[in-house]
Image: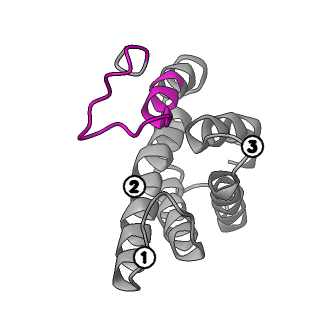
Amino acid sequence: IFHMKNDGLKWYQINANYGEVFFAFSAAFVVFILSKNYATAILLVMAISDGVTGIIRFTYFRKNGYNVKLKKHWSGSLGYFLSALLIVALIFPEASWLSKISWSIILTLVEYQRFLDDNLAVPLVGILIKPLI
């Protein structure tokens, strides 16, 4: 609603960035169609791993004197991968390490791509690669 009224929440929303809206729709969709455990894994990866990338990106670019403005960097992707791996390992301890690592790598690459907002791409691909877990 705030985006439609062009009256964004300055402390939270970025002009022309609908990430939080996409996250809300994706979260509702994932919870509706997936099992509880798998939906939890996808939602945690969307929330925690994406946050980890932001913290690492902010720290890296600020430390090196660059403008932090929504740039992607390999260091953030490494953090995304490690946190996704930890999440899937905790939720699905019975899955093989090869499947956990593959799942985490695929979601990391999907988050890093620039064609589709990661809040849409990660759950979409997460649904498609569910057989890995």
Q: In front: 4, or 50?
A: 4
Q: Relative to 124, say whether 33 is above or below.
A: above
The colouring scheme, among rainbow, by chain, secondary structure or one colour, is one colour
Tell me the quadrant of the picture where the N terminus can be found. top left
Residue at 60% x, 44% y is 118
Residue holding disc 3: 129
Residue at 52% x, 57% y is 93
Residue holding disc 2: 51
Label 1, secondary structure: give it: helix
Determine contact: label 3, label 1, CB under 8 Å.
no
Q: In front: 111, or 123?
A: 111
Q: Is residue 81 magenta?
A: no
Q: Amino acid at mark 3?
A: Ile
Left or right of 50 in this view: 77? right
Q: Amino acid at mark 1?
A: Phe
Q: In front: 24, or 100?
A: 24
* Majority secondary structure of magenta residues: loop
Q: Relative to 1, say whether 76 is above or below.
A: below
Q: Amino acid at mark 2?
A: Gly
Q: Which residues are magenta?
A: 4-25
Residue holding disc 1: 61
Front position among marks 3 and 2: 2
Label 2, secondary structure: give it: helix
